[in-house]
């Protein structure tokens, strides 16, 4: 590539196609993003790999989740068996699924779809002490980057990120609070499910956690409040950016990982495609703090990468638009 | 099928799956719709057929469009050559494309993807006289129903509807005005593109058209103001409803066809899945008048079925969710 691909060049290419200029709205914007990321007018977007990062959270000791911590392991097993919601969506849209053990608090049996990248058996309880050591958070970031690069080297044109980890909406809320930044009460939502009392308790625990450290440096914030799967997703975004490969970011927790990734390395925002606005209370505000406009708004609040998978066909359509459409000049001249 | 499939039964099935109840938001609602339409907990949604209905409009004689009427034929040829935007999206999502000549004002050469259902070479100018005869509108409705049934008999699990017809946003605005109903100025938008003067002219012509007839009977409104491709899409919705097959409705013009179809036969609303909220001015209001909640909001304003194709993967994901996900009981008991 001698000449860089500029936004003006991509818009010019799209505007010359046989339709009213701009009439495909955000799909055209997405096509521009893909062309700029790949520095190509024919970006590839066929092969999609979903990486579901799993980890446990010491915060669950203080009952920040309505679900027991053991569900993390049970859902990892379900994902590996191909029986979780994300697997159903992956089959529907055509995606490979890999589950990354970033820090599940259990010994997991080997499986062809399981990548063992375990840094520790869960984080420590961030309400009482730093969630990770400096070595742990750095290892999680590095392994995430390696895994993204490995997936791209295996042939993935696009990565989708997802997560599984009971308690991780609490960790993500703390990251948002400190990195967006935003008042803690604006960052806390029901996660996998809470009644009013459960939500109030979660807020109280997270308020206590936030009072324990005044960190604002992104690496230190990740160390104090993050999760192993969240840090590893942030690393994966760094790895994808190094390879100029688009990353579809799922919901609240995954967006918190993208927020950390961007606070560590602002330029990686270029490769992040935000899939959806979730039903989790703080997500819309976090997206706005990142100037991110998500593609979908479907009231999702599951995780596992389900929203990222649903957005993937839009990314593929945007890539197809760049490649395959006649120019208006060719249409009017009968050159088809 | 001895017992009818009820919404309660489908919700119960979904709620028992291994995720927090309701956490897939509108995808769960879509799964319920699919199950109720098909009366099955395992609806098929793999094979997607896009029918693009094309027709010309006498209203173009009064310059309601910024584009010349000849573009209809040119874009039909482009669609048949596989080089239009809808073809690119169809390849990206995996859909068959068929172009239906409902009323193009030209003789079209035979093509394997072209269905000749021509009722007339365009409509008459609805600003001055009824767009169609009673026989024409009835023939268009009947042929649309036949074509939908034929596509389903060829194997389509889902139909997507799209259109191509210079001037058809003007016709659709008149249908909305009379059938939503809504003041004509709330129904008129820029269509394929207009500056302020063009939009004012379009409104003036459509105001004159609306003053020519006070019809409110849906068949008479279609006859007075409709297009051949719009009437045929309405018929296709009737045909799909007869076969209990979901129809993905594209943007403003297609929604006007669905409005007509529903005013003629209210029960057919059950099979209509509204793909997106378009950038055309009246679309949001028309959708609200039909109590329709579209799946996507991407600023599209092209037609050709492009928005319907982009929504199709969401429909497939909803079907996959019903079929393929473990129950929480099975997960907790280790039965995977």
Image: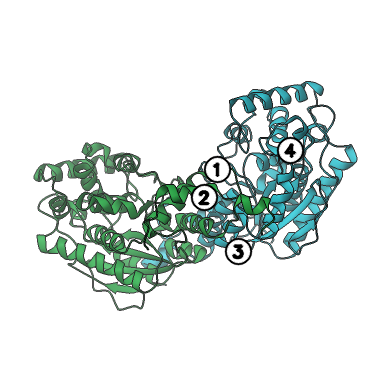
Chain colours: A cyan, B green
Q: Which quarter of the rendered picture does the C terminus of chain A lie within? A: bottom left
Q: Which chain carries label 2?
A: B
Answer whether labels 4 and 3 touch (C-beta < 8 Å): no
Q: Are marks 4 and 2 on the same chain?
A: no
* Front residue of B30 and B224: B30
Q: Name the residue under label 4.
A: A260
Which is more foreground, mark 1 or mark 3?
1
Looking at the rendered structure, the secondary structure element under dot 2 is helix
Q: Neighbour class for label 2 at 10 Å: few (<14), some, many (≥20)?
A: many
Q: Name the residue under label 1.
A: B21
Answer whether labels 1 and 3 touch (C-beta < 8 Å): no
Which is more foreground, mark 2 or mark 3?
2
Q: Do labels 1 and 3 share a chain?
A: no
Q: CA–CA distance between discs 4 and 3?
A: 28 Å
* Front residue of B300 and B105: B300
Q: Which chain carries label 4?
A: A
Q: Could you say which quadrant of the image residue A254 lies in?
A: top right
> Which of the labelled discs sits on residue B14, or is there none?
2
Q: Mark 1 lies on which chain?
A: B
């Amino acid at each position: 590539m001698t000449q860089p691909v500029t936004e003006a060049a991509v818009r010019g290419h799209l505007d010359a196609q046989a339709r009213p200029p701009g009439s495909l709205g955000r799909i055209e914007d997405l096509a521009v993003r893909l062309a700029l990321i790949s520095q190509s007018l024919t970006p590839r977007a066929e092969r999609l790999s979903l990486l579901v990062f799993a980890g446990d959270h010491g915060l669950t000791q203080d009952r920040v989740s309505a679900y027991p911590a053991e569900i993390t392991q049970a859902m990892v097993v379900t994902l590996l068996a191909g029986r979780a919601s994300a697997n159903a969506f992956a089959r529907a849209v055509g995606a490979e699924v890999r589950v990354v053990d970033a820090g599940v608090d259990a010994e997991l049996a080997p499986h062809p779809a399981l990548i063992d990248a375990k840094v520790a058996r869960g984080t420590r309880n961030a309400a009482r002490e730093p969630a990770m050591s400096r070595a742990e958070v750095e290892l999680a970031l590095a392994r995430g980057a390696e895994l993204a690069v490995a997936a791209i080297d295996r042939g993935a044109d696009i990565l989708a990120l997802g997560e599984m980890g009971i308690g991780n909406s609490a960790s993500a809320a703390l990251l948002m609070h400190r990195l967006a930044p935003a008042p803690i009460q604006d960052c806390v939502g029901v996660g996998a499910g809470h009644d009013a009392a459960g939500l109030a308790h979660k807020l109280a625990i997270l308020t206590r956690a936030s009072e324990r450290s005044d960190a604002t440096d992104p690496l230190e914030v990740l160390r104090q409040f993050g999760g192993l799967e969240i840090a590893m997703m942030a690393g994966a975004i760094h790895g994808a950016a190094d390879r100029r490969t688009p990353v579809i970011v799922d919901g609240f927790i995954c967006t918190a990982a993208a927020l950390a990734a961007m606070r560590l390395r602002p330029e990686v925002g270029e490769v992040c495609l935000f899939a959806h606005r979730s039903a989790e209370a703080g997500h819309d505000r976090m997206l706005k703090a990142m100037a991110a406009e998500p593609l979908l708004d479907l009231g999702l609040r599951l995780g596992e990468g389900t929203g990222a998978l649903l957005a993937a066909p839009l990314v593929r359509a945007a890539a197809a638009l760049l490649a395959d459409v006649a120019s208006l000049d060719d249409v009017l001249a009968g050159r088809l």
